[in-house]
Amino acid sequence: MERYASIERKTNETQISLSLDIDGEGQSKLETGVPFLSHMLDLFTKHGQFNLNVDAKGDIEVDDHHTTEDIGICIGLALREALGDKRGIKRYGNAFVPMDEALAQVVVDLSNRPHLEMRAEFPNSKVGTFDTELVHEFLWKLALEARMNLHVIVHYGQNTHHMIEAVFKALGRALDEATTIDPRIKGVPSTKGML
Ligand SMILES: [Mn+2]
């Protein structure tokens, strides 16, 4: 069974073509117009063993907000579509990832109940030209559209770039675990019978 989805989304603010293969080789092709976000999505894809292509044209002359938010929406939509009825998946994933002095933890439940809980204090409001508050924006839209419960904790760190990098790597690894097919699981892993 191929776990793949492609998404086309066009608004007055952004135009996005995106494809996601859950069972990939960590390959990405990213034209986001937001270099720091491309860097983070590259890490996410690599450590999640996905394949991800993003071609986005957004109103980055305003700022990176709409583009970052809408890419989060599209990855969420793709994840949800590619997972289908979620038969046989592990459902939960948990990953700790250190990046030099920083330590991030991401816990996911592909529960069909969107929630983001985020505990992260970034020392700087910018990494290069990227507003670090957009990390929350991206993660919330991702969780909302993928319909997952996402908990993101940065336990400590000093360098904002390292801290965010650890978050995206941990997100990839936690989602890799949660989406893994476990041959012992028959049907959908919920006592409700659906997710
Ligand atoms: Mn880096």
Image (cartoon, helix red, strand yellow):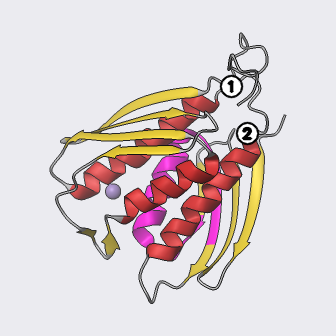
Vertical arrangement, residue 34 with respect to residue 165, above or below? below
Q: Residue at x 62, y 47 (%)?
A: 146
Q: Which residue reaches farthest top?
A: 184
**Helix, strand or loop at mark 1:** loop
Q: Which residue is mark 1?
A: 89
Q: Amino acid at mark 1?
A: Ile
Q: Quick one: SS at disc 2?
A: helix
Where in the figure is residue 52, as x and y percent of width and height?
Answer: 63, 54
Most extreme residue toward the bottom, as rendered?
61
> Looking at the rendering, which quadrant does residue 187 occupy?
top right
Residue type marked 2: Leu
Q: Is mark 1 within 8 Å of ligand 1?
A: no
Which quadrant: the N terminus?
A: top right
Are the residues at dot 1 and dot 2 in contact (C-beta closer than 8 Å)? yes
- Provide the residue span drawn in magenta: 30-55
Would you name the residue on which mark 2 appears?
A: 83
Q: Dot 2, how many residues are within 10 Å of its Cα: few (below 14), some (14-19), or many (20+)?
A: some
Residue 115 is one of the magenta-drawn residues? no
Ligand 1: image quarter? bottom left
At a point 71% along the width and 71% down the height, the residue shown is 9
Q: Position of residue 5 (x, y in %)?
A: 76, 52
